[in-house]
Image: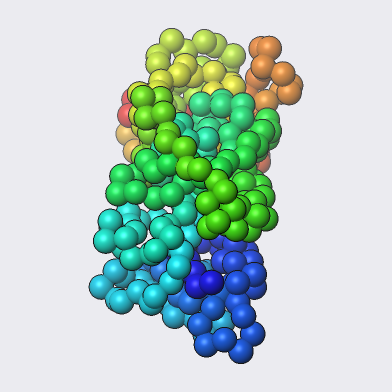
Amino acid sequence: MKVVFFGTPDFVVPIVDALHKTYRVPRAKESGVVAVVTQPPSPAGRDKRIDHSPVDQWAWDKKIKVITGFNNSLPDADLGIVAAYGKIIPEKIIKHFPKGILNLHPSLLPVFRGASPIQAAIVTDTNRTGLTVIKMDKLMDHGPIISLFKEDVLPEDTTETLRRKLFERSIQFLLDLIPNYLSKKIIPKEQDHAKATYTKIITREDGFIDPTNLQKVIDNKTPRKKWVISFVSNFTTQYSPVTIHQFIRAMTPWPGTWTLLRLTAGGQAPKRLKIIRAHLSQPTKHNPQLILDEVQLEGKNPVSWEEFKRGYPNTALTRDGV
C-alpha cells in the first residue's frame, strides 16, 4: 500500500516511521510512505539558519519525496494520514486519495475541534481526553469518526507530556485500525455536530496572566474578576490557584506564561516576567496555595522565585506600572 503522510513536528515522526516500516515492500519501487507533506523550511535562531521540520528531515534521510506546498504534484497513493500537519488541507487534495485521508486529532471529537485541543483539555480541567481518528472532509475536524481511544489527564500533565502520551499510543492504534478501515469492517460514524466546541491557534500573547489577579492569588486573596481564556471559544473561568496552575501547565512548553512587574518605585516601565514552573501546595483541590518555583525576568537567566524576591525585594506585579 502507498501512503502520503501529512505532518510536521518531532512527536509525529514515530508515526510516519511505523507506517513506512509496516507498508514498505522490499525491492518495490513505490510502497510504504511515498511522500510527506510538511511545513516549509523557515529561518530559526539568531543566525536565521534555515530549519527543516523533523518530518522533512526524516523523509530526507529515507530518500522519500518532500512536499511543502500544494502547488507540488502529489504522487499516486491509496491513503493519506494526517498528524499535526498545521495547515488546512484543500478539498481537492482530500479527493486525490481513493481511500480518503485519516486525521489523528488529539481530543474526543466533537469536543475541542481546531488547533489547540490538548491545551484546552488542561486549561478547562477536562479530566479525560483522548485521540480521535476521523475521515477528513472539507470542514475542520468535521468528518465522520473511524475510531477513538480515551486517556486520563493527570494532575501534573503539561501540554508536552500529554501530547506525547497521546501520539505514542496512537501508533499501534492506527496500525491496528487501518486494515479494518480498508476492508470496510469499520462503519464511519457521523459526529454529533450540535455538541462541537472549538479552539484557536495560540499566540505568544495568549500566555499572559493578569498581574493584579496573580498577586491576589499568591497572597491567598480571592479575585472576583472573570478570566477569559482566549484560545477556547466561549470559555471563562475564575482566577484561583488551581486555574492558574492549569493555565501554566497548558502553556508548557510553548508559548509559556508571563506577567508584568515593576522593579522599583518611580516611572520605570514594567518588565515581563516569565513563569517557568509552579506547583500547588497540596495535591487536592481543597484550598491549595499556588507556589511559584522558577521565573525569568526579561534579559536575565532563570532563577527560583525565592532567589528572585531576594534580588528584587521591592517589586510589584502590575499591569501599567502605576
Residue 154: percent from left, percent from top: 68, 33
The relative height of residue 317 versus residue 105 in the rendered view (above or below) is above
Q: Who is closer to the viewer here, 203 or 96?
A: 96
- Could you tell me residue 286's position as x and y percent? 68, 12
Q: Is residue 299 visible?
A: no
* Quadrant hosting residue 269: top left
Where residue 237 appears, x then y in whole percent?
Answer: 45, 19
Answer whether residue 194 is visible to the viewer in this image: yes
* Residue at (46% x, 31% y) in the render: 111
Label count reads 0
Residue 276 lies, with reference to residue 301, above or below; the image says above
Which quadrant would the C terminus be assigned to in this image? top left
Locate residue 232 relative to residue 311 in the image: left or right.
left
Residue ID at (40%, 16%): 226
Residue 127 higher or lower than 206, as above or below:
above
Task: Tell whether 9 sits left or right of 44.
Answer: right
Looking at the picture, tell me which residue is in the foreground, 227 or 149.
149
Residue 180 position within the rendered picture, expressed as x and y whole percent measured from the top left: 59, 53
Residue in the image at 32% along x and 60% along y: 95
Q: Is 120 placed left or right of 319 in the picture?
A: right
